[in-house]
Amino acid sequence: MHKKPKFIISGGGTGGHIYPALAIADELKVRFSEAEILFVGAKDKMEMQKVPQAGYEIEGLWISGIQRKLTLDNLLFPFKLVSSLWKSKKIIKRFRPDVVIGTGGFASGAVVKAAADKGIPTLIQEQNSFPGITNKLLGKQARKICVAYEGLERFFSADKIMNTGNPVRQDLLDVSLKKNEAEQYFGKAENKQVLLILGGSLGARKINQLIESQLDNFKNQNIQVIWQCGKFYYEEYKKYKSENVQVMPFIDRMDYAYALADVILSRAGASSVSELALVGKPVIFIPSPNVAEDHQTKNAVSIVNKGGAVMIKESELAEFENIFNRLMTDKNQQENLGRAFKKLAKPNATKDIVDQIVALMH
């Protein structure tokens, strides 16, 4: 190709949409060092900070999702949609991309639609086992749909679907080799099992309350706790810091945390599920019930059905102590869960998605 390849990537609103978008951009840069890559996001969402931090240009659209209740945002939605489609068309006309890639979120809807209307090849990447509104609508026009779960033929035409898995951070591929560094980083007590708690980057109130109520139980069982409580909750929970309990707003070295953990307690967002599969440790999922279309429960169930994890719903947390104590004393169950989960991992997801993008360029 004599001209520089150009790509528009759009996705955002949550880390779950932004992270895959950045992973795809990085892999495109590896394939085409001279590629021009432009991100398009929603004006007031986290992608406007995260994408420039990763070294890419981004343009913002005036768009937001539809709320379930009547709000000013909802009344403005038709205007925002028209404005975003109009701006997307202008961006596409000016930038002239070879392929447009959407990873979910409302901003990606406008851009992928505007590209598809102009006959530019488009690819969407669906992280969840149950697609969001935007991707469901775009599925009819997109040329390729990269998915991470089985059974999406219910929503998309089967000949467009490629089961690639979700892009994951490359530093998670061999966490088992980092055990020594991880022990130095976090400090590891002799003869203790390590429990890692992840409630998402902002935190999860229900999980934090649960852990608070279980600290004595953990202590009796000789468990060392690494607790990412989230930045909203750190002030409230930092008082529990002790020799056995590390409380943090956010874990910078996730690879070390995964390397050290014997058992992991986590939300079931799509990116987390894909990362945890690579790590191959026993996981207890406590899905967030307050996400669109109950994605997280569906993600968790698809792993539980294959013997790869344990799930406890927020409404059933009274059962937690029994289930947890059984798992901590049963090394066999721990190994079986970790092994079954690891079989579901797709370590080459990002490369496979970029192969599909390259195929669309010709």
Image (cartoon, helix red, strand yellow):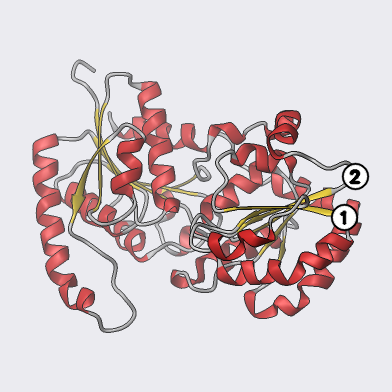
Relative to 288, is 196 on the left or the right?
A: right
Q: Position of residue 357 (x, y in %)?
A: 35, 35
State which quarter of the image contains the N terminus: top left
Cβ atoms at labels 2 and 1 below 8 Å apart? yes
Residue 301: which disc?
none
Q: Residue furthest bottom?
A: 70
Q: Nearer the viewer, residue 17 or 52?
A: 52
The residue carrying pointer 1 sits among few (fewer than 14), some (14 to 19) or many (20 or more) residues within 10 Å by Cα, namely some
Q: Identify the image quadrant of residue 55.
A: top left
Q: Residue furthest top?
A: 2
State which quarter of the image contains the C terminus: top left
Q: Nearer the viewer, residue 358 or 183?
A: 183
Q: Residue at x 76, y 48 (%)?
A: 338
Query: 243 above or below 221?
Result: above
Query: 353 above or below 237?
Result: above
Q: Residue at x 55, y 59 (%)?
A: 234
- Going from N to C along the chain, the mark reached first, 2 or 1, is 2
Q: Which residue is mark 1?
A: 222
From this viewpoint, is residue 143 visible? no
Q: Which residue is mark 2?
A: 191
Name the residue type under label 2.
Answer: Asn
Name the residue type under label 1.
Answer: Asn
The residue carrying pointer 2 sits among few (fewer than 14), some (14 to 19) or many (20 or more) residues within 10 Å by Cα, namely few
Query: 158 above or below 314?
Result: above
Relative to 13, is 152 on the left or the right?
A: right
Q: Nearer the viewer, residue 176 or 207?
A: 207
Q: Position of residue 20 (x, y in %)?
A: 43, 43
Q: Position of residue 313 (x, y in %)?
A: 65, 73
Q: Position of residue 13 (x, y in %)?
A: 35, 57
